[in-house]
């Protein structure tokens, strides 16, 4: 029985990604809603997979407009057992969901901070005086939208359909090619051969050129890095953890050799997984 944790409630983009994961990897289960387990926050969804309450968690890690999802990155670094099993890239198109008949009637807009940021130009242009309130997920306040015609929410078309609410404007995201990459996290390594790998590391000392040495490990072997991002270690100001995505599977001999050398120029090194991207 495969169970999937995701950032809920129902109707979030995380749920769409979770459904896509089931369709890709467990097509016989994709129409069984009991397989999906919503959680109120991203860390709670990840912890559910960490502690074995579910088989996998599907969580956002990077948006093409707003960059990395910090809660996911921090949870990945702290995790002791999870591996990336799959990556899913999902096109994101935001809808303004409200019972208001026109924009002038709207007083408040609710949504996840990432969604508000992805629609910021549109909001500044069409709803410049409306209060924007961040929520844990896009669908958190759809019950308020149903009860009050002065309230709007930014969420997916699927969310509007699930909660039987009207869409006033669609799409409203500032960039048409808005995409979010989701990770499928589980306690076991993927069963299929990966095409990409992710790792994270901290440095031994915060000094000039400290980051150059780990990067040269890959450059010297012609291994392409598709992404690098930093997060504070939370130990001291100016100390960072670096997250790197690599266009190579972990069993590539060239990559395996690079990992051995990388251990000598980093403080802590964590292999997050080798996986394919859907």
Image: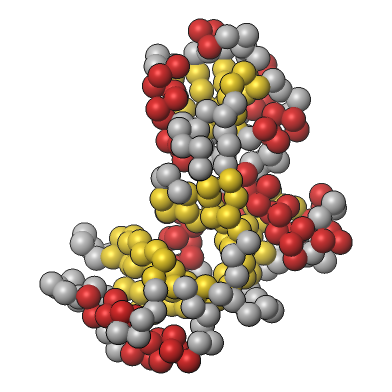
Q: Is residue 213 left or right of residue 173?
A: left
On the rendered structure, is 274 left or right of 265? Answer: right
Which residue is pictured at 62% across the width and 44% down the height? 13
Tell me the quarter of the picture where residue 54 sits. Answer: bottom right
The image shows residue 73 at horizontal and vertical percentages of 45, 60
Q: How is the image coloured?
A: secondary structure
The percent coordinates of residue 47 (x first, y second) are: 58, 61
* Residue drawn 64% across the image and 41% down it: 12
Q: Nearer the viewer, residue 108 or 80?
A: 108
Residue at the spot 65% in from the left edge and 14% down from the top edge: 99
Residue 126 horizontal/vertical position (percent): 45, 16
Residue 263 in view: no
74 horizontally vs 47: left or right: left
Left-right relation of 114 to 237: right
Q: Quadrant of residue 238?
A: bottom left
Where, by quadrant of the figure, is residue 258 drawn?
bottom left
Against 253, residue 54 (above or below) is above
């Amino acid at each position: 029985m495969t169970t999937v944790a995701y950032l809920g409630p129902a109707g979030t983009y995380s749920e769409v990604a979770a459904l896509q994961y089931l369709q890709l990897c467990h097509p016989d289960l994709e129409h069984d809603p009991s397989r999906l387990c919503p959680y109120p926050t991203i860390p709670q969804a990840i912890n559910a997979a960490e502690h074995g309450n579910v088989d996998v968690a599907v969580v956002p890690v990077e948006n093409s407009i707003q960059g990395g999802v910090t809660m996911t990155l921090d949870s990945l670094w702290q995790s002791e057992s999870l591996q990336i099993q799959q990556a899913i890239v999902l096109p994101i198109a935001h809808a303004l969901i409200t019972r208001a008949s026109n924009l002038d009637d709207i007083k408040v807009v609710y949504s996840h901070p990432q969604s508000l940021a992805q629609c910021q130009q549109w909001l500044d242009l069409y709803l410049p005086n409306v209060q924007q309130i961040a929520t844990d997920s896009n669908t958190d306040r759809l019950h308020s939208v149903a009860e009050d015609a002065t309230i709007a929410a930014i969420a997916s078309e699927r969310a509007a359909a699930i909660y039987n609410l009207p869409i006033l404007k669609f799409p409203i995201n500032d960039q048409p090619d808005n995409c979010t990459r989701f990770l499928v996290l589980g306690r076991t390594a993927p069963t299929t051969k990966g095409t990409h790998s992710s790792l994270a590391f901290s440095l031994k000392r915060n000094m000039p050129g400290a980051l150059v040495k780990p990067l040269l490990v890959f450059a010297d072997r012609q291994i392409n890095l598709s992404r690098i991002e930093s997060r504070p270690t939370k130990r001291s100001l100016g100390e960072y953890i670096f997250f790197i995505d690599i266009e190579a599977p972990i069993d590539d001999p060239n990559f395996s050799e690079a990992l051995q050398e990388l251990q000598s120029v980093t403080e802590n090194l964590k292999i997050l997984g080798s996986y394919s991207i859907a």
